[in-house]
Amino acid sequence: MELTDGAQKTLTKIGQECSLRYAIHLITTANLVAIKRRAAEVDKEDIRKVYNLFVDVKRSTTFLRDYEQEFMFSDIAPKTDAAAADGDAAMESQ
């Protein structure tokens, strides 16, 4: 597979920031995208497309933390001001 200079630079940056394993997976899937569009080489836009489709561990963890309250089986109840005040009062009485 052939890569443009822009694609190589983008993959290098992703490999440094995320992991080499993740960057290698992106190379494979970006090649499939390039084949589908009948291109001779993988371009920076192919890398960006698969980067947005497949999330690395860091972005996945951030997403889960940001939206944990919205998941169906979340055990963590949202803390309201009233609940926090009740909890503080219970701690003081002990």
Image (spheres, rainbow, N blue to C red):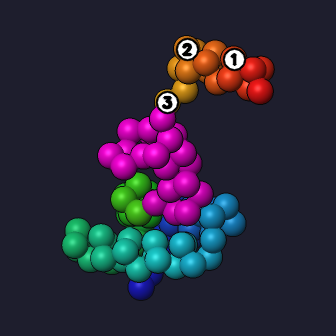
Magenta span has 69? Answer: yes
Picture quarter with the N terminus: bottom left
SS at badge 2? helix
Residue that carries the numbered disc 2 in the rendered image: 82
Kindly identify the residue that appears in the image at 56 percent across and 68 percent down: 11
- Residue 34 drawn above or below residue 78: below
Find residue 48 and report its horizontal and vertical position in percent. 43, 57
Frontmost of labels 3 and 1 is: 1
- Residue placed under numbered mark 1 in the picture: 89
10 Å crowding of disc 1: few (<14), some (14-19), many (20+) = few
State the image quarter where residue 34 is shown.
bottom left
Highlighted magenta segment, given as a residue range: 55-77
User: The disc labelled 2 sits on which kind of residue?
Assistant: Ala
Instruction: Where is residue 59? Give x, y as percent.
Output: 54, 53
Give the residue number, with chain letter if any, for mark 3.
Answer: 78
Between circles 1 and 2, the one closer to the viewer is 1
The quadrant where residue 17 appears: bottom right
Give me the C-alpha separation between circle 3 and circle 1: 18 Å
Q: Is residue 22 above or below residue 63?
A: below
Of helix, strand and loop, which one carries label 3?
loop
Residue 76: % across, % down: 50, 41
Residue 57 against residue 20 in the figure, above or below: above
Q: Is residue 5 visible?
A: no
What amino acid type should be assigned to the residue bearing mark 3? Pro
